[in-house]
Image (cartoon, rainbow, N blue to C red):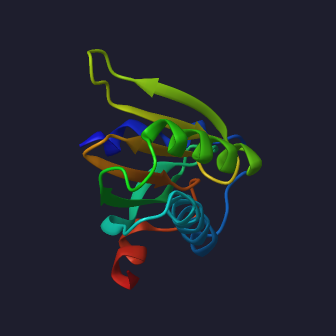
Amino acid sequence: MGASLALTACGNDPPGRVVPPDQARSTVVDVVEETTEAVGGDWALYRGPDAEVCEQPDGRDGARFVYILERKGADGSTPATDIRMVEELWEGKGITTERFASGGADPFTGVRGADGPVTSVGFNAYPQRYSVTGVSTCSDGDVAELRQTE
């Protein structure tokens, strides 16, 4: 599963960026769902939004949210076209992007993003399966409590 490629530690969040848990959760959901709407097709929930422990800028434990949607393969356009569209969307939100491709004759392709409204986000544009993975900024929440309300 290529979803883990976008996951980074919340400890990388710059100081002063801690947000309430409900805002962290809704922001990552918005970014992932706006991405899937821009690409189009029928997407299904793979995971989340699930609370996980992260480290806040001051070293205390906090909570981040991971949200993953996926769909089967390309849907009318090529992965390269979809990657360009996702890059433009994310860059418009202040997310720094970087394309990636595996080696070989038929590489796995996609784009990763960081900063802006999320800690990280990834779009895997594999011909067989697309996925979008978002990781929220680290919030001031308690993961055990948040999991009881999910």
Q: Is residue 129 left or right of residue 123?
A: left
Q: Is residue 5 left or right of residue 9?
A: left
Q: Is residue 135 above or below residue 13?
A: below
Instruction: Please tell me which residue is depicted at 38% across the width and 56% down the height of the picture.
Output: 75
Q: Position of residue 72 (x, y in %)?
A: 27, 57
Instruction: Please tell me which residue is depicted at 49% across the width and 36% down the height of the picture.
Output: 80
**Which quarter of the figure has residue 102?**
top left
Q: Position of residue 71 (x, y in %)?
A: 32, 60
Figure quadrant of the C terminus: bottom left
Instruction: Please tell me which residue is depicted at 58% across the width and 47% down the height of the picture.
Output: 86
Q: Position of residue 1 (x, y in %)?
A: 23, 43
Query: Can the viewer see residue 7 in this picture?
Result: no
Instruction: Please tell me which residue is depicted at 49% across the width and 52% down the height of the picture.
Output: 135
**Which quarter of the figure has residue 58?**
top right
Q: Is residue 107 left or right of residue 113?
A: left
In this orientation, which residue lies closer to the viewer: 13 or 124?
124
Q: Is residue 23 left or right of residue 15?
A: left
Give the farthest residue toward the front.
76
Query: Can the viewer see residue 72 in this picture?
Result: yes
